[in-house]
């Protein structure tokens, strides 16, 4: 397909041109050109600026026509009124892959912007341009050292992100990097003048570097096509979607932001039901769901065992599971009897959830508990819930790290191949405790164990992960 | 009422006895007696222990009968099988106010515990004892330097917390102290042998130090009475309730935790609708709701203006408001025109939500924006949404602090007496940015401005705060 060829050039450009590369860096922000330089793009980079001879040591060209070779991706960063001429220059020079960074078009809702929008649309269609944007951050591909924003992660990974918002593209990739999630390809596409979410989706379907696709959508031009494409891709690569603008105020904000029509809540309910794609409710939530898919394989059910300490907290965990749609079957009597052999009855709960401080004092007991809980035939997944405040007092956090090291290593031999996740919580007003939390979070994430702060992010992500696998299983049986 | 007299003694004890005070502190936890000593209780404290002469320098008594004066609150911390005898000692010595810390009773669901429960119930009723517990942490009153747990805050404030869980009592007070919320009285009452939530509520209704009441409930003995008492108190002191155990797994966990019957979801829906009390969904959520009530006065409506920067973020804010039940009316045309005079159209939104980086570069512009937004007749409350990542790049956070100082001080003259809240978010993987966030959080909280991390906690708390005031207004009109 033709899309694939030019999107390949856009995501793996050998040559880049920045129209409007300034001689000096603007205060407080390195500019598009500066960001590309700082990230170490290894291809041939052409600054386009008729008023200067050089930009940051590179020869500047007055226009694209003067550049001695074809450009895989032209990035336009001039004021909105100058964009039509820049697009004409693209056509004249035969460079048809374009990212328009500039904003000030139909999203303003004002006459000047709407007229400029009509102009660039006409030019783009007449010249058969492939336009990302306008009003967006464009492309981030860590493997190619390609970015247009400040200090993104240098690591790459199996997740792709298609985002209508440039801010969200930066925020989501930044936030997930804390969780050890890295990206194959990210594209922020703003007002979607010609290229829309479905074009990127189709490309990513066949991209060997992409295993999971996250999306932030404001509006969609062709809903039927989106449903068809998402339904198809979602069978092999989970598609996780945050759909914005489903409230009255959100609809108006979406129109102001990317000039998009948001669509109604009932349409999107049907979309998720029919496509089987995974619904996210905020950037943070999408990060937790992505983390779950990133590390866990598949599951047959929704039955969870929760093991922690603190009675009120065990109740919270049970309610969080129930609210999310996970079930928490009580352990069989013989399992309860075995747990009772090393967990005293006073102050402890053993039916599932397990609430038992003594277990966490000795890793040998954690092992026995994991072994027993995961051997239960009615249990599909395991959660260890660490209340850091209580464990911190043992020896100022050393023991917490010991538990995390154990869970990241040896313990995994005793889970009968069932998925294991960890949650941690701290409530005390002591800054040393969250520091320990961050430390064990890194340790567990590096070992491929999903970690969440608090129950709700964990249980709601696990429920959607299990729901995805049920959908895929049921579809494959028909 | 009789309750009031003895609860006054329990919350303001001149004399305390700890039955089972050990000669040595157990490893890793100072014990009940150690916690009381460490917190600096100024009254007369009697260790009861027949096997030693002294505990931590204080003369030990073999039993309560030997103590030379009446005891306002007896705290029992002996193994469960020894609790019946300790209660008999209370009766023999004429000391009827008792907190049983010990667990291992009906919450175990096992025969030994159930039998012990029957025994202590019989003794307590026969001796007309006022029992807090068993299986709980008891009383925390900062003003009286009274606690049974490790390192609680030394500050006192206008919030009371009635919690069936001792862990939650510690966690909630610890977590809220980060938000500058402090307590008049906290009681954790576990299995509620004789004293139940309604007894504490009735006492707090007349407590001049208490203005807001938070509750964590697992089970309730007399639902009709709770409805009556909460409905009455809630008219003058907002009652914020986290009800646990409303899922199948939660119901079972509640039985294991405090031996309580949780009740059904539909009953509790009706309870909240009829009483007008404020429903919370987790400890963290209850903290955010309490914070909102703590600092904001009353409101006539639910119409909010949101001012921030970042288009995708503005859309998120709008959706969060819509989902919570707040409305976000667009500003009038003349107000939009005035905003447009200092906010350029390219890349910015001015209709409400406002998305405009330029505003946040100069506090004079923040002032103009606040003045215009709060003068809108259709706006009831104001939210400033700070995206720290973007502002951090201006000068490594100095400017963010300048904005916070401005909001905490001078800016408040320009809000036309409308409530102002602040949210902040950071997504970048840079530990310096959350540090700035914590700094401005403290600064704003000290100035009495509620601060939230992210939109959802803010919008959902504001919606419930507004809902409470609507309920009160409508009731007072009938």
Image (tube, coloured by chain):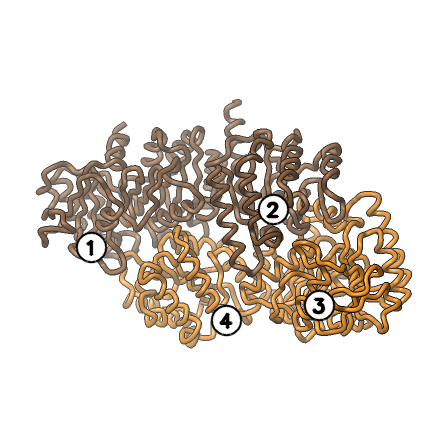
Chain colours: A brown, B orange
Report which residue position mark 4 lands on: B446
Q: Residues within 10 Å of mark 4 (few under 14, many from 20)?
A: few
Q: Residue at x 39, y 59 (%)?
A: B388
How far across and how far down the image is residue A163, in percent? 36, 44
Chain bearing tag 1 is A
Q: Which mark is residue A79?
A: 1
Task: Name the element at disc 4.
Answer: helix
| Same chain shared by disc 2 and disc 3 | no
Between circles 3 and 1, the one closer to the viewer is: 1
Between circles 1 and 4, the one closer to the viewer is: 4
Task: Name the element at disc 1.
Answer: loop
How far across and how far down the image is residue A201, in percent? 35, 35
Q: Are marks 4 and 2 in contact (CB under 8 Å)?
A: no
Mark 1–mark 2 Cα distance, whole angstroms, equals: 50 Å
Query: The N terminus of chain A appears in which quarter of the rendering?
Result: top left
Between circles 1 and 2, the one closer to the viewer is: 2
Q: Quadrant of residue B39?
A: bottom right
Between circles 4 and 2, the one closer to the viewer is: 4
Task: Name the element at disc 2.
Answer: helix
């Amino acid at each position: 397909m033709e899309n694939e060829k030019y999107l390949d050039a856009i995501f793996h450009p050998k040559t880049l041109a920045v129209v409007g590369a300034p001689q000096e860096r603007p205060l407080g922000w390195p500019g598009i050109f500066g960001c590309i330089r700082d990230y170490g793009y290894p291809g041939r980079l052409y600054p386009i600026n008729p008023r200067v001879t050089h930009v940051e040591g590179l020869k500047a060209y007055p226009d694209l026509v003067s550049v001695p070779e074809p450009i895989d991706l032209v990035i336009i960063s001039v004021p909105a009124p100058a964009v039509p001429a820049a697009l004409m220059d693209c056509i004249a020079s035969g460079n048809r892959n374009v990212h328009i960074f500039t904003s000030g078009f139909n999203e303003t809702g004002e006459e000047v912007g709407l007229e400029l929008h009509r102009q660039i649309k006409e030019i783009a269609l007449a010249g058969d341009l492939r336009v990302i944007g306008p009003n967006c951050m464009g492309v981030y591909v860590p493997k190619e050292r390609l970015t247009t924003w400040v200090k993104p992660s240098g690591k790459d990974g199996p997740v792709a992100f298609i985002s209508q918002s440039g801010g969200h593209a930066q925020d989501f990739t930044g936030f997930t990097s804390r969780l050890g999630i890295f990206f194959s390809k990210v594209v922020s596409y703003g007002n979607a003048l010609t290229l829309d979410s479905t074009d990127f989706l189709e490309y990513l379907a066949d991209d060997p570097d992409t295993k999971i696709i996250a999306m932030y959508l404001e509006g969609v031009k062709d809903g039927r096509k989106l449903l068809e494409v998402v339904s198809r891709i979602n069978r092999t690569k989970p598609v996780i979607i945050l759909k914005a603008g489903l409230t009255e105020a959100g609809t108006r904000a979406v129109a102001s932001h990317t000039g998009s029509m948001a669509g109604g809540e009932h349409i999107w309910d049907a979309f998720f039901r029919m496509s089987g794609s995974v619904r996210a409710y905020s950037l943070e939530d999408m990060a937790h769901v992505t983390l779950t898919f990133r590390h866990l394989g598949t599951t047959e059910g929704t039955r969870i065992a929760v093991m922690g300490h603190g009675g009120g907290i065990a109740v919270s965990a049970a309610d969080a599971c129930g609210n999310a749609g996970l079930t928490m079957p009580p352990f069989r009597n013989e399992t309860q009897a075995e747990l009772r052999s090393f967990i005293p009855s006073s102050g402890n709960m053993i039916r599932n959830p397990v609430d038992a401080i003594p277990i966490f004092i000795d890793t040998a007991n954690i092992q026995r508990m994991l072994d027993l809980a995961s051997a239960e035939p009615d249990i599909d997944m395991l959660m260890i819930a660490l209340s850091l405040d209580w464990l911190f007092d043992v020896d100022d956090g050393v023991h917490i790290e010991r538990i995390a090291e154990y869970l990241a290593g040896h313990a995994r031999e005793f889970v009968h191949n069932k998925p294991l996740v960890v949650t941690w919580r701290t409530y005390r007003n002591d800054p040393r405790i969250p520091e320990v939390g961050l430390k064990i979070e890194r340790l567990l994430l590096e070992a491929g164990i999903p970690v969440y702060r608090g129950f709700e992010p964990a249980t709601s992500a696990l429920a959607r992960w299990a729901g995805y696998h049920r959908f895929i299983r049921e579809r494959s049986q028909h």
